[in-house]
Every structure is written in C-alpha cells, then in structure tokens.
Image: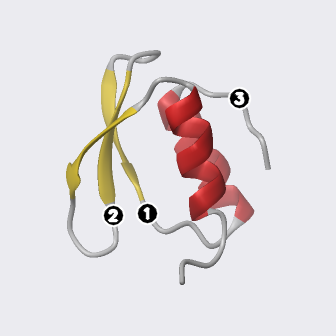
C-alpha cells in the first residue's frame, strides 16, 4: 500500500500528458513532461511540499 500523495500525483501527471519512462533508484520513478520537455523524478511523496515540488518540476500548478 502506497501512503501519502503518490496516487494523486500520478493521476495529475497522466491527466497532464506526462509519461512514465523508467524506474529510478530506490522508490523513485523517472517521468517525462511534455509541458516542460524535461525528465523529472517522482518519489513516493509523503509530504505536501514534496508533492507540490513534483508538480512544479512537471510544469503543473500546485494542487496540494
């Protein structure tokens, strides 16, 4: 069971057109954002600040 904001982040990323690229080190994943045209990491976010940081890296407005 994944706790925190992970499921909500993944839902927002896929709705924005972001794509999963590969698994990274530990519990991180690498995603690609068509908005910023960059790759970014997605940890299993447990805090609101971390979740909003992932959205910022993806070019999506804060949601948490």
Please, is residue 9 above or below residue 35 in the view? Answer: below
Mark drawn on residue 8: none
Residue at (68, 69) in percent of width and height: 47
Is tag 1's residue or tag 3's residue first in the polypeptide sequence? 1
Gap between marks 2 and 3, in whole Å? 21 Å
Asked which secondary structure carries label 2, the reply is loop
- Badges 2 and 1: C-beta atoms under 8 Å apart? yes
Residue 5's spot in the image, x, y percent? 65, 63
Tell me the quadrant of the picture where the N terminus can be found: bottom right
Residue 22's spot in the image, x, y percent? 20, 50
What residue would you read off at disc 2?
A: 28
Residue at (73, 61) in percent of width and height: 48
Residue at (69, 58) in percent of width and height: 49
Residue at (34, 73) in percent of width and height: 27
The furthest residue to the bottom = 1
Is tag 2's residue or tag 1's residue first in the polypeptide sequence? 2
Q: Which image quadrant is residue 60 in? A: top right
- Decide: few, some or many residues near mark 1? Use Cα within 10 Å; few <14, some 14-19, many ≥20: some
- Badges 1 and 3: C-beta atoms under 8 Å apart? no
Tell which of 3 and 46 is nearer to you. Answer: 3
Asked which secondary structure carries label 3, the reply is loop
Gap between marks 1 and 3, in whole Å? 18 Å
- Decide: few, some or many residues near mark 3? Use Cα within 10 Å; few <14, some 14-19, many ≥20: few
Residue 17's spot in the image, x, y percent? 47, 23
What residue would you read off at disc 3?
A: 61
What residue would you read off at disc 1?
A: 43
């Amino acid at each position: 069971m994944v706790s925190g904001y992970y499921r909500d982040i993944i839902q927002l990323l896929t709705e924005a057109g972001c794509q999963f690229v590969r698994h990274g080190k530990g519990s991180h994943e690498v995603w690609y954002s068509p908005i910023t045209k960059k790759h970014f990491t997605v940890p299993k976010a447990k805090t609101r600040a971390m979740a909003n940081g992932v959205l910022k890296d993806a070019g999506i407005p804060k949601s948490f």
